[in-house]
Amino acid sequence: MIIGIDLGTTNSLAAYFTPEGPRLIPNRLGQKLTPSVVSIDEEGQVYVGETAQERMRLYPDSAASVFKRSMGSDKEYLLSGKSYRAEELSSFVLRSLKEDAEHYLGEPVTEAVISVPAYFNDARRRATKRAGELAGLRVERIVSEPTAAAIAYGLYQENKNTRFLVFDLGGGTFDVSILELFENILEVRAVAGDNFLGGEDFTEALLRLFCEKQKIDPLSLSRKEAESLHHQAEECKKRFSQSNVCTFTFSWNGQTYEQQISAVEYEAACEDLLERIRRPIKRSLSDAGIHLNEIDKVVMVGGATKMPMIRHFVAKLFRRLPDASVNPDEAVALGAAIQAAMKERDAAIREVILTDVCPFTLGTEVVREVEEGQFEGGHYCPIIERNTVIPASRTERLYTVRDNQTRIRVHILQGESRFAKNNLSLGEIEIEIPKAKAGEEPVDVTYTYDINSILEVEVKVVSTGKTVRQVIKGQYTQMTDEEIEQRLKDLSYLKIHPRDQEENRLLLLRGERLYEESVGNRRVLLEQELTLFEQALDSHDENRIGQARNRLKSFLEKLDEP
Ligand code: AMP
């Protein structure tokens, strides 16, 4: 059996093809979306999806998320003291999807078509294939996400040449792709994006608006309290899909804070974010040499395009309603399943893809003025942005921050995080500079990146012309077959947590978290309910466990409600 998989940054989905068309495959919890989160405990037990997400809130050091961004790089993630690469973490997600699909379909799943962003270059596509292999799947075909979305919308069936724009606003990234269909070949004409823009920013904007109105200083919250507030913001954001006025509720220090927020107010708070959406659209159109009026269709993909304010914005910009007839969360997986079926019949859509783009952002660490006269280190300054057509060369001018500074250190980084520490360190250049007042002695930092993945960094002191250069070769690891085999062996002691216990495990974790978040009577009640459930589990009586599970579930749902 062959299935289609959307291996997403935030969520992953699997789908298969039926005579009635593509259908999603529910996971072990009966849900269509499996959060792309992995958690590993001390015993080497692997948790994927919602259970891993709950574990991440309770034991942050045991879990990782958004690792797709580092696919194909050497970045290592530490989980319960052991390190894993992005493709290994992705392989756990794939393995979990594969097992769920086998259970649901009642037959072995041996092969998959997996989708990747259009800007993934060859090395990152290979890393994705490897993740599939590590999960025990054959991956002969990779399909790019906008192409899969276009297939889900049936755009490949159009007879005439069609141009369309795929608008993909996910949790943490915004991608625009312009595709052209020409005689059964889909060509990705241009891609543009913003690595720092996604649904998450809209959650943050709502969170800030709430805190402002309720006079809560978010910085005074503990990590867990901040996560709980974030969770409430996320839930409230989603309610705007149904209502024009929403209530934001947050319990903190035994007090409940409640605030009504209107869609108009919320949109006003997102003005800057909406403005940022405009830029990649403009860039992709100009890169493709296409005028906005020449776009035949706009297709919406990604969970965040469910926000009414985004749909209005796109409708206004293109002066037509975007096509959102397929659920934006599901379009890519459904398209991958169609592509999988077509592959079996040898009728797959051929795509012409862009591969000569820089697959990730290359930048340096800088100090930023956070408030007047107050500086903070550790910030990231992108120099060559992900998606830039290569070879590319870009220069950024940096200034001294202290009076009489005698050296400048340029830290060379690769990655998409706003913070230097979360990105991959590739090297360092130090250069001496003449003493001067702060901000008066600039250096020019030039990054040149070529098709062979060679990065050359040059730092030049503007006043003296003194120059230092460093060459950094290939950021990709090309695993050999033997290495894959070895890694498979290394990972084989890790077992995906048994699926039949998943729901019980998730309930217990959710209960534990709510216990930590509560005080007083809520805690006492929670303790009682959790103990009852644990006793039922100890009895091994399926009937009793089922009843206790339902009871605990509705109890927790009531508690977790805003
Ligand atoms: P994706 O990466 O495509 O799974 O998108 C995830 C993003 O979509 C997250 O930021 C979610 O908060 C957001 N999202 C999902 N459903 C909704 C909804 N109904 N309204 C607003 N945002 C949503």
Image (tube, helix red, strand yellow):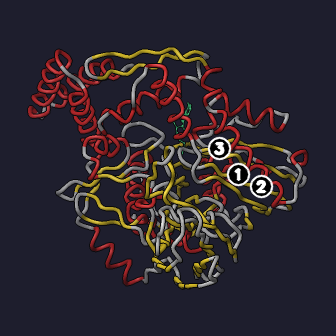
Frontmost residue, 206 versus 11: 206
Mark 2, secondary structure of its residue = helix
Residue shown at 82% from the left, 54% from the top: 285
Instruction: Name above or below for residue 304 compared with residue 396.
Output: above
Residue 176: give its label: 1
Element at label 3: strand
Residue identifier under label 3: 301
Q: Is residue 539 visible?
A: yes
Q: Position of residue 14 (x, y in %)?
A: 50, 49
Instruction: Calculate the distance from the C-alpha at mark 2 to the C-alpha at mark 3.
Output: 19 Å
Instruction: Name the mark nearer the viewer: 2 or 3.
Output: 2
Rendered location of residue 469, percent (x, y): 56, 85
Q: How many marks?
A: 3
Residue at the image position 60 percent from the left and 43 percent from the top: 302
> Where 531 sits versus 304, above or below?
above
Q: Position of residue 43 (x, y in %)?
A: 17, 57
| Quadrant of ligand 1 in image | top right
Q: Nearer the viewer, residue 297 or 470?
A: 470
Mark 2 — residue?
Answer: 283
Q: Are marks 2 and 1 in contact (CB under 8 Å)?
A: yes
Secondary element at image label 1: strand
Residue type highlighted by circle 1: Val
